[in-house]
Image (cartoon, coloured by chain):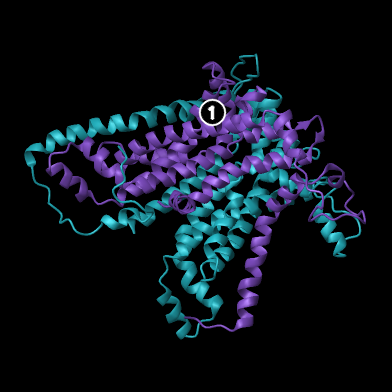
Chain colours: A purple, B cyan
C-alpha cells in the first residue's frame, strides 16, 4: 500500500470528492426544492433580503396537483414507458440474433457487416432527422407511436448488437460443441445453451437501451404532434411553457416525475447498467 | 426459453476453463454445416439489416439527395447542385453555428476528460459508501437531458438565478451575471451543463479501465521513488490510453451532434449566437420548412464524424493486430 498522512487524505481525497458529489447532485436538489416551493416564494428577486433559496418553510404539492390535473402528464409517462419497452424489446431481439451471428458464425461479408453495424452505431440521430421525417410522412406513420417504436431501434440495435457480440465472444465455443455432439442442432444450441448463459449481458443491454429511449428527444419532437401522444421530455418542453411564460414550479415537478421512473429502473440494476456502459465502448 | 443457467453479473467467467477442446473432426458434416451456417447467418441478420437499411441507409441517401435539391415542405423541388451548401457557407448564422460546434465540442470534451479522469482516480480508492457515491455520480447521465437542462436553465434564470444569489451573498459580485442573456456567456453555460452531464460517463468507463491495472505496478513504482504524479503519468496513463481514446471518440461524436441541450437552454439565442449545426439544421429544415437547406447544414457534420469514426476504426484494428 501507498501510505499517506491524514491531512493529505483530506486535501487530496475527501475535499475534491465532496465537491464532485455536491456539484453532481445540486441540480437535482434544486429541481426538488423548486417543485415543492409555493409560487410567491419562487418569484422573489435574487437580492431580496427575505430570500432563503435553499429551503422552504411552506412546502406545497400544488405544482404536482396542477401538473396532473391540467396537463396530460400521466399519459406522457405511459407513452414514454410503452415506447421505451417495445423499442427495447425489438432491439434486443434483433441485437441478440445479429450479435450471435457476428460472434459465432462464419460467412462471407461477416467482417464488413460487423464494421457497417459499428459505423451505424456512431451515426447520430441529428444527422438524419430531416430525411427521416420525410420517410415517416411517406409511410403515414407521423403522429403515431410507431414512428418512434420503429426509429428508436436505429440507435439501439447497433449498440445491443455490439454489446452482445462482445458478450458471446466470452462464452467458450466448447459449450456449444458439446451440446451439438449430444445431438442439438446449431439453432437449438444457440437458443437453449448460449442465450440463457447470456442473460446478464441481455439485461445490461436492455437496461441501457431503456434509458436511452427514455432520454430520446429529437425524433419524438419532430414525429409526434398531438399533445396526448407525446413523450415526457417533449411534453414538458412544449406543453408546460405557455407562450413565453415558464411555470417553473410545474416544470420542475414534471422534470422530477419524469426522471423518477428511469432513475428507479437504474437504481435496481446499477451493476448491469455499469456493465452495459463500460461494455458499450469496448471493442 | 431464457431460463438462466449461470446467473449473476459475473456471467461467462464462471463457465470458463474445463471442457477440453474436441478438435475439428466430423469431416463428412463440414460441408453441410457450412451451408447451414450461411443460411442461419442470413436469417439471423435479416431483421437488423432490414431495419437499419430502411431507417439509416435509406434516409442517409435521401438526405444527400435533399441537400442537392430545393425541396421545401409542400414543394417537391428540383436538383440544384451544391447551391444549398454554398448558400450555407456564406450565411453568417451558419458560420457562427459552425464555429460554435467546434468550440463547444473542444472545450466540453477537454473538461469531461480531465474531470472524469480525476473522479475516476478518486473513486478507484477504498472508502465507505463507495457504491452509493458511484451510483449517485451516474445520475446526470441517466436523467433525460431535456429535464436536467431545465433545472440548469432555472438556475441560470436572469431574474431568479440561485447562482447569482450565492455569488452576491459571498461578496464576489455586485450586479448579476448575464448567464443566458449574453452569447458568449450562454455558450460557456452550455459547455458547463454538457460537462456536468457527460463527465460520469468518462469517470465510470475510465474507472473500469483503472480497475484492470495491477496494483503491484504502483507498489513497484513507489518503491522506486515515484511520487503520485509520476505514478499516474508513467504507470496509469499508458495503460489507460486505449480505453481513454475510445471514450473520447464516443464523446466527441455525441457532443458534436448535440441538439437537445441547446434547444432547451437557449433555443439558439440570444440573436442566433449559440446555434450548433444540429439546432440550426432543425431551425431551417423543420421550423422554417426548407428541407433542402436544412439537410445541407446537417450534412456539414458528416466529414468530421466520418474522420473521427475512421480514426477509431483504424485504432481498433491496430489494437487487434498487436
Q: Is residue B283 left or right of residue B56?
A: right
The quadrant holding residue A246 is top right
| Residue at 46% over, 60% down | B208
Q: Residues within 10 Å of mark 1 (few under 14, many from 20)?
A: many
Instruction: Answer with the quarter of the image where residue B242 lies.
Output: bottom left
Is any part of residue A138 visible from this angle? yes
Residue appearing at x 88%, y 52% in the figure = A46
Give the camera-side residue of A99 and B8.
Answer: B8
Residue A187, image x, y percentages? 23, 35
Residue at (55, 35) in percent of width and height = A125
Residue B144: tell me if it is visible: no
On screen, B243 above or below A169? below
Quarter where residue B2 is shown = top left
Label 1 chain ID: A
Residue beneath disc 1: A148
Asked which secondary structure carries label 1, the reply is helix
Seen in the image, is A154 located left or right of residue B17? Answer: right
How many dots with numbers? 1
Q: Whole-percent x and y of residue A43? A: 86, 45
Residue B160 at x, y percent in the picture = 84, 48
Viewed as shown, does residue B193 lie left or right of A147?
right
Which residue occupies the foreground of this view, A49 or B91? A49
Q: Could you tell me which residue is drawn at 63 percent across and 34 percent down?
A: A232
Q: Nearer the viewer, residue B98 or B129?
A: B129
Q: Give the percent coordinates (x, y) of residue A98.
A: 34, 37
Amino acid at each position: 500500500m501507498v501510505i499517506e498522512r491524514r491531512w493529505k487524505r483530506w486535501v487530496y481525497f475527501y475535499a475534491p470528492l465532496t465537491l464532485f458529489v455536491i456539484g453532481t447532485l445540486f441540480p437535482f436538489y434544486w429541481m426538488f426544492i423548486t417543485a415543492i416551493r409555493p409560487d410567491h416564494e419562487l418569484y422573489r428577486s435574487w437580492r431580496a433580503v427575505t430570500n432563503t433559496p435553499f429551503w422552504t418553510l411552506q412546502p406545497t404539492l400544488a405544482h404536482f396537483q396542477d401538473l396532473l390535473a391540467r396537463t396530460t402528464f400521466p399519459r406522457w409517462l405511459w407513452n414514454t414507458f410503452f415506447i421505451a419497452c417495445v423499442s427495447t424489446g425489438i432491439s434486443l431481439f434483433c441485437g441478440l440474433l445479429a450479435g450471435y451471428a457476428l460472434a459465432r458464425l462464419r460467412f462471407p461479408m461477416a467482417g464488413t457487416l460487423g464494421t457497417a453495424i459499428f459505423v451505424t452505431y456512431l451515426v447520430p440521430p441529428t444527422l438524419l432527422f430531416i430525411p427521416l421525417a420525410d420517410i415517416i410522412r411517406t409511410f403515414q406513420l407521423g403522429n403515431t407511436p410507431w414512428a418512434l417504436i420503429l426509429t428508436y431501434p436505429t440507435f439501439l440495435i447497433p449498440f445491443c448488437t455490439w454489446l452482445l457480440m462482445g458478450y458471446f465472444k466470452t462464452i467458450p465455443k466448447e459449450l456449444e460443441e458439446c451440446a451439438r455432439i449430444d445431438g442439438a442442432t446449431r439453432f437449438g444450441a444457440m437458443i437453449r445453451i448460449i442465450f440463457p448463459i447470456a442473460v446478464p449481458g441481455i439485461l445490461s443491454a436492455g437496461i441501457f437501451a431503456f434509458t436511452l429511449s427514455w432520454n430520446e428527444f429529437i425524433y419524438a419532437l419532430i414525429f409526434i404532434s398531438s399533445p396526448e401522444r407525446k413523450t415526457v421530455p417533449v411534453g414538458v418542453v412544449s406543453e408546460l411553457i405557455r407562450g413565453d411564460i415558464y411555470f417553473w414550479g410545474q416544470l420542475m415537478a414534471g422534470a422530477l416525475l419524469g426522471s423518477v421512473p428511469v432513475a428507479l429502473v437504474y437504481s435496481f440494476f446499477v451493476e448491469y447498467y455499469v456493465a452495459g456502459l463500460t461494455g458499450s465502448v469496448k471493442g | 426459453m431464457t431460463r438462466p443457467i449461470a446467473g449473476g453479473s459475473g456471467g461467462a467467467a464462471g463457465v470458463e476453463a474445463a471442457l477440453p477442446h474436441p478438435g475439428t473432426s466430423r469431416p463428412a458434416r463440414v460441408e453441410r454445416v457450412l451451408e447451414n451456417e450461411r443460411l442461419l447467418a442470413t436469417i439471423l441478420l435479416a431483421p437488423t439489416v432490414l431495419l437499419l437499411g430502411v431507417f439509416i441507409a435509406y434516409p442517409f441517401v435521401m438526405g444527400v439527395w435533399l441537400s442537392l435539391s430545393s425541396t421545401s415542405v409542400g414543394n417537391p423541388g428540383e436538383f440544384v447542385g451544391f447551391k444549398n451548401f454554398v448558400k450555407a457557407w456564406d450565411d453568417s448564422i451558419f458560420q457562427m453555428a459552425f464555429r460554435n460546434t467546434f468550440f463547444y465540442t473542444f472545450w466540453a470534451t477537454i473538461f469531461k476528460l480531465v474531470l472524469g479522469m480525476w473522479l475516476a482516480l478518486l473513486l478507484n480508492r477504498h472508502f465507505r459508501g463507495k457504491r452509493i457515491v458511484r451510483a449517485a455520480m451516474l445520475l446526470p447521465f441517466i436523467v433525460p437531458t431535456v429535464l436536467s437542462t431545465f433545472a440548469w436553465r432555472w438556475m441560470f434564470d436572469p431574474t431568479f438565478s440561485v447562482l447569482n444569489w450565492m455569488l452576491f451573498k459571498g461578496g464576489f459580485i455586485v450586479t448579476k451575471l448575464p448567464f443566458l442573456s449574453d452569447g458568449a456567456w450562454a455558450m460557456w453555460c452550455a459547455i458547463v451543463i454538457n460537462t456536468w452531464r457527460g463527465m460520469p460517463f468518462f469517470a465510470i468507463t475510465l474507472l473500469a479501465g483503472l480497475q484492470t491495472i495491477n496494483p503491484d505496478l504502483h507498489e513497484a513504482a513507489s518503491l522506486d521513488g515515484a511520487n503520485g504524479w509520476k505514478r499516474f503519468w508513467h504507470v496509469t496513463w499508458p495503460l489507460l490510453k486505449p480505453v481513454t481514446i475510445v471514450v473520447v471518440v464516443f464523446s466527441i461524436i455525441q457532443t458534436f451532434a448535440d441538439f437537445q441541450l441547446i434547444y432547451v437552454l437557449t433555443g439558439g439565442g440570444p440573436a442566433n449566437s449559440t446555434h450548433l449545426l444540429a439546432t440550426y439544421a432543425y431551425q431551417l429544415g423543420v421550423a422554417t420548412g426548407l428541407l433542402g437547406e436544412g439537410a445541407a447544414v446537417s450534412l456539414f457534420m458528416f466529414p468530421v464524424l466520418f474522420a473521427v469514426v475512421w480514426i477509431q476504426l483504424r485504432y481498433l484494428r491496430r489494437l487487434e493486430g498487436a
